[in-house]
Amino acid sequence: MTGEVGRVALPQHTVDSRLVVVARAQRAEDYDAVLAVLIDAGIRSVELTLTTPGTFDRLPHLLAQYGAVADLGIGTVTSAIDLARAADAGASYLVTPITSPAFVAQATDAGVPIVPGGLTPTELYASWSAGASAVKIFPAGQVGPGYLKDLRGPFPDLVAVPSGGVDLDGASAWLAAGALAVSVGGPLLGDAFAGGDLVALRDRAQAFVEVCAR
């Protein structure tokens, strides 16, 4: 299956670390302190979401600071305009919560990896067969790691990244089930974007890094 379509590979930091942290902040200025802790703790892939105002404006600064050691992707991409803007801004990869072969084609033409979301076999296969770099099983908490094993029956080559409700135990279980990586938000970030304890954030991040290490 993988030889049938053009497919842009996910960046190496993401593949090697097997962990993507979804950073959904209230303001783009809040990224700085949290990302500093995450990168220091060993996180090597962060998805910055477009639900955070100012993400596009902040991306060049963050890429200059961390781009050499970590992949910085743009997530919650829901329009062709935002997809083009994210690609032009230098995002390491793109994540969309929806199934859109048109988005996959647009990202592939731009040479940027894309991970579209989906839950049903039809949705996930539509993205994968269109040339997605991987597919995001979302919301993963509604199905569990056994779902990926079931999908591997008809789709043995499917490259999947579960997202939504993945905690520390879930990360281990999804990776054992064959996920390329896990996408983690609240269970790792906690209240970090609301003034929470950054020492505790570092501890949580290090725990996830350890669980996801090959």
Image (cartoon, helix red, strand yellow):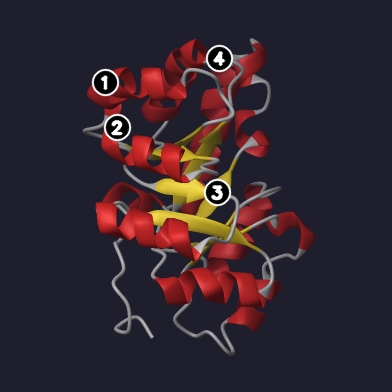
In which quadrant of the rendered image does the N terminus lie? bottom left
Disc 1 on helix, strand or loop?
helix
Q: Which residue position is annotated with label 1? A: 65
Q: Nearer the viewer, mark 2 or mark 1?
A: 2
Q: Mark 4: which amino acid?
A: Arg
Q: Amino acid at mark 3?
A: Ser
Which residue lies under the disc numbered 3? 183
For disc 2, the marked residue is: 89
Q: Residue 196 lies in what quarter of the image?
A: top right
Spatial distance from mark 1 to mark 4, Cα to Cα? 18 Å
Name the secondary structure under disc 3: strand
* The C terminus lies in quadrant: bottom left
Which-is-in-front pick, marks 2 and 4?
2
Q: Earlier in the sequence, mark 2 or mark 1?
A: 1
Pointer 3 or 2: first along the chain? 2
Cα separation, mark 2 vs mark 1, equals 15 Å
The secondary element bearing badge 4 is classed as loop
The single residue placed furthest to the right in the displayed view is 142
Where residue 139 sits, quadrant-wise, is: bottom right
What is the spatial separation of the Cα atoms under label 3 and label 1, in whole angstroms?
22 Å
Q: Are marks 1 and 4 in contact (CB under 8 Å)?
A: no
Residue at x-position 67% and y-position 68%: 145
Q: CA distance from mark 3 to mark 4?
A: 21 Å
Mark 4 lies on residue: 27
Q: Is residue 79 visible?
A: yes
Asked whether, in this view, residue 21 is left or right of residue 191, the answer is left
Vertical placement of residue 65 versus 204, above or below: above
Image coords of residue 77 (percent x, y): 51, 42
